[in-house]
Image (cartoon, rainbow, N blue to C red):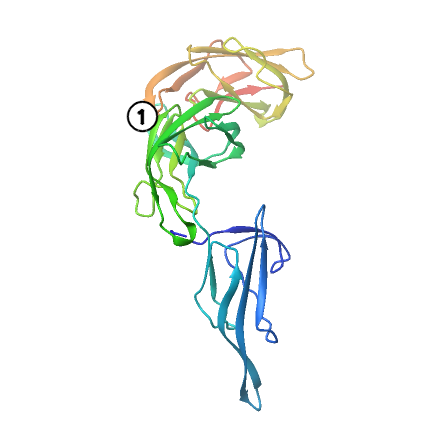
Amino acid sequence: MGTGKGDTVYLRNFPMVGEDARLISFDTVLNYFLESGRLDFEGDGTSNFLTFGYNVKNQFISEECGSSFVLSDLTVLEHNFDSVRVINSSPTKAGGTNIEIYRCPETDTLTIDFNQLFATTNGVTITNPRSDHISHDFNLITNPEDSVFSGRVATVKLPVSLIENQTVFIFTTDLSTDTLQVTYDRVTEERYPPCGTQTFITDITIGEHTFDSMSYALDDDDEPLRALVDPQEANLRVFGCPPTNLLQVNFVSAPNQSTTVSIESITGDHFEGNLLTSVYSSNILPLPVDLGSTISTFYIQYENNPVVETLSVQYVFSSLRYFKACPNPVITGLSLVETSSSIRVINTTLQYPAVSNVEITVD
């Protein structure tokens, strides 16, 4: 109700389909030998019904074709939905919508999209800036009063307060904790008689936050979507800066054939403990260089091998930034601190997603 847009509804063991279904519309066959029917809708925690009546007329066509049934005067007799209306009272074999079901809008749901920023660089210029919708695994998303969500999502729908003009959310993952304050205006009125008086949220404003970057999502007219609508559309977009310190190692065996290695330990001078929580098996290995130094050293312990591989690299922090909102510089000028017959640099600029920077030849 309000937007007039189709609303996808989840129904359990829906008889028209014979199983659980997510539907925006459906067809049902009417019984010519009755003049009424009933449909039951069972969802998760919801139970609705709709009864309807109609007239049936047996109409003679010809001796060759016989007679046919004509249905008319479709009427809703009873229901427990928010609102129902008949828009075509004459069902036909051609189908088409006869009844529309409306529900009162949810007025408190803020929708946030999460995105990862990307760009391409050769260490001198930045090209092809872009962003991709990306999921995050949230341990918990809370407001000051409630725990409202946990799980992996790329889009999250969160309840805002309808009694105050602001809501603060806290987003917790294994790696970070971020906060977001949103402010807005509240309008309390009766827009739709079946729904009574409701409070609507308008003029949403991004307040203080600790994310890398945020913006308003745009509607079909490329205008900021600063009111809450239902069905929900993205109101805000969160953008994560690309990590600039990922060095990728390729493992090869002579003659330069990619090979998979099993690694049980990766330690370094600029972080504590082992980067790995279990044995890592792959032909590539991304490593985080030290953003507080121009030299990073890693010690790679292969599984069932007493020899520890030492990888020590030096690099330069350039004046390039991927985006204005992203403070960390592009790292380039990668080279080995000490020459090695088994290690060589094949790309001097670190990028994200990581590209092959160093090649290690293993026996």
Q: Position of residue 136 (x, y in %)?
A: 50, 31
Q: Quadrant of the C terminus?
A: top right
Residue shown at 58%/46% (left/top)? 44
Graded by Cα atoms within 10 Å as few (under 14), some (14 to 19) or many (20 or more), the crowding at tag 1 reads few
**Is residue 315 shown above or below 2?**
above
Residue shown at 38%/14% (left/top)? 316
Q: Furthest residue to the front?
A: 196
Q: Amino acid at mark 1?
A: Lys
Report whether residue 29 is seen: no
Residue shown at 46%/35% (left/top)? 158
Of the pair 245 and 342, the residue shown nearer to us: 245
Q: Quadrant of residue 260?
A: top right
Of the pair 102 and 333, the residue shown nearer to us: 102
- Image side of residue 9 versus residue 214, left or right: right
Q: Position of residue 192 (x, y in %)?
A: 38, 52
Of the pair 284 and 44, the residue shown nearer to us: 44
Of the pair 358 and 215, the residue shown nearer to us: 215
Q: Position of residue 106 (x, y in %)?
A: 44, 44
Q: Position of residue 215 (x, y in %)?
A: 34, 33
Report whether residue 150 is seen: yes
Q: Quadrant of residue 139?
A: top right
Residue shown at 57%/73% (left/top)? 35
Q: Secondary structure at mark 1?
A: loop
Residue carrying label 1: 324
**Is residue 190 shown above or below 351?**
below
**Is residue 14 shown above or below 334?**
below
